[in-house]
Image (spheres, rainbow, N blue to C red):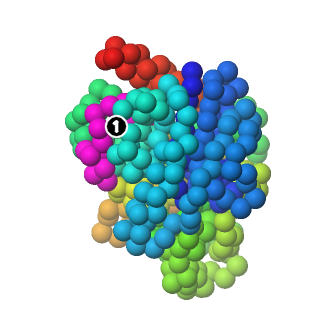
Amino acid sequence: MRITIVQGPFLPVPALRGGAIEKICAALAADWAARGHEVTLVSRRFPGLPDAEERDGVRHRRVASRDAPAGRLAFRWAEALYCRRALAVLPPADVVMVNSVILPLLLRSTRHGVPVHYAGRYPKGQYRLYPAIGWVAAMSQAVAAAVEREAPQFAGRTAVTAGPLTAAFAPLDPAALGGERQRELLYVGRLHPEKGVHLLVEAFARLGERAAGWRLALVGPHDSAAGGGGEAYLARLRRLAAPLGERVAFVGPLYDEAELRARYLGASLFCYPSLAESGEALGMAPLEAMAMGGVPVVSSLDCFADFLEPGATGFRFDHRAADPVAALAETLAPLTTGAVELAPLRRAAVERAGFYALSPCSERFLTLFERAVAEAGRRA
């Protein structure tokens, strides 16, 4: 099969600046190429990366773009310019998988392949504008349902493929899980208000003696160019953490997967208190933590229900409560005091993460592509 992937406009591939979707699509592309498919990946031009190369069996084509500008209008205009350039280099293909808001508006036929819209983020109204061709590959059940509510033309043509864990985070063998880990509570993600990081810092402080001997590590970028909340939000987090002294570590971003893997392997608990009701599509960071044997604590967003069973593979707190900080602190307390045994939870988390391993996830995408091509052939 000839498969083209078009990435978003603002992050490079390989994922030198992070980006869950960028890492996911690069892993899928390499796996499909290894299976004998002809794969082309289109992404932004970036210093140190050639405009055209073959890497891991995948043909890369890079076109001019820029870092994400501030302001919604400037953001979409920059994306539109990138999409026009990407359109000009698309090869003939059977399937074109799109990770862009604007590009589907330009794909009015199957000339470059049957469009498969990768719903790696929660829809925000754009799907109702798209031509009624192609399929949708959704990250989670919640995203699939939201797409079909928003765009009835895709009802029956939306499949939950999820997103794969990359090779660096391939699920551990449950039988090989080690003994006790550090008393560390880990967060990995953007330091941004919509991620609820301030709730986590406040809840950790509110635990008091119930978290004696524990430390909190925050891994991720705060700068606006990388999707963070900027200097003002970082300053707010530092003020909240000040009474805890060295028990709170601001690690910064870790784009090297080996370093990030080591962080996951060293932590006992992982917390992802996202408040992004219409932003989270699945939650790759909690899944990476689970694959590495971490016990996750997440908010009550619908997307987390795909992989987290409360009390079995992790825990959820009510981020919509009148006092969400108290709700999070009370969820964490039995985990930090030893009232709940973590070892069986770690094993269950690793086993559940197996559903998101690269090989089965890759096969789900290929099955969808075959259906999409077959349907297009019948319509033709």
328 with respect to 20 (left or right): left
Q: Position of residue 103 (x, y in %)?
A: 42, 47
In depth, the one of 85 and 71 nearer the eye is 85
Quadrant including the N terminus: top right
Residue at image position (51%, 84%) is 232
Magenta stretch holds residue 132:
yes
Residue at image position (74%, 39%) is 55
Q: Position of residue 89 (x, y in %)?
A: 56, 43
In depth, the one of 203 and 377 nearer the eye is 377
Q: Residues within 10 Å of mark 1 (few under 14, many from 20)?
A: some
* Disc 1 secondary structure class: loop
Q: Position of residue 123 (x, y in %)?
A: 34, 49
Q: Which residues are magenta?
A: 124-139
- When the figure is inspected, residue 148 is found, relative to residue 224, above or below; the finding is above
The extreme front residue here reads 88
In depth, the one of 163 and 106 nearer the eye is 106
| Tag 1 residue | 108
Residue at image position (41%, 69%) is 74
Q: Amino acid at mark 1?
A: Arg
- When the figure is inspected, residue 334 is found, relative to residue 252, above or below; the finding is above
Magenta stretch holds residue 290:
no
* Rendering quarter of residue 11: bottom right
- When the figure is inspected, residue 276 is found, relative to residue 380, above or below; the finding is below
**Residue 81 visible:** yes
Quadrant including the C terminus: top left
353 with respect to 107 (left or right): right
- When the figure is inspected, residue 208 is found, relative to residue 121, above or below; the finding is below
* Rendering quarter of residue 251: bottom right
Q: How many marks?
A: 1
Residue at image position (68%, 50%) is 51
